Image (cartoon, rainbow, N blue to C red):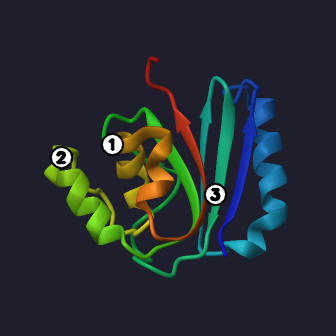
Amino acid sequence: MCGIFAYIGCDGTSDDVRTLAIRAASLQKHRGPDWDGSYAFPKGVLVHSRLAIMAPSSGSQPLTSLCGKVRVCVNGEIYNYTEVIYRCMNAGYDAPKTGSDCEAIVLAYMRWGMNFPAYLDGIFAAVVVDERDP
């Protein structure tokens, strides 16, 4: 089971805040021993500890949209990820960048916004950070 740590509502670009978030996330390292990733932004920090089951050589998180403005940390499995990816690509959205089933969440969010869970079949928890202009 992957570990997700999100510290929202702070200045994630601050060295002190980023260090604190990474230190706090290290307490759940046992949940995702295969890889760590983080993303610091002006309104928070995301840290992900990955347990690589599907596509162990790709799918590092946080996952990022092609525009670079949407980031997602996920734990879980998306059973219908090929269908979701196909539907999004047929609607003109970009192809996934990794082999991770969880990247379907990025595409689904980009296409359907906050209604994206209605299009997913699986078990998952996700944190989505959208830095696009409203």
Q: Is residue 83 above or below residue 41?
A: below
Q: Is residue 55 above or below residue 13?
A: below
Say whether residue 109 is left or right of residue 93: right
Q: Amino acid at mark 2?
A: Ala
Q: Amino acid at mark 3?
A: His
Q: Would you call the spot at circle 1 few (<14 residues within 10 Å), some (14-19), or many (20 or more)? A: some
Q: Secondary structure at mark 3?
A: strand
User: Residue tagged by mark 1?
Assistant: 111
Which of labels 3 and 2 is toward the front? Answer: 2
Residue toward you, 35 or 94: 94
User: Residue tagged by mark 3?
Assistant: 48
Ranked by sequence position, the earlier of labels 1 and 3 is: 3
Q: Amino acid at mark 1?
A: Arg
Q: Would you call the spot at circle 2 few (<14 residues within 10 Å), some (14-19), or many (20 or more)? A: few
Q: Secondary structure at mark 2?
A: loop
Residue 54 visible in the snapshot: yes
User: Residue tagged by mark 2?
Assistant: 91
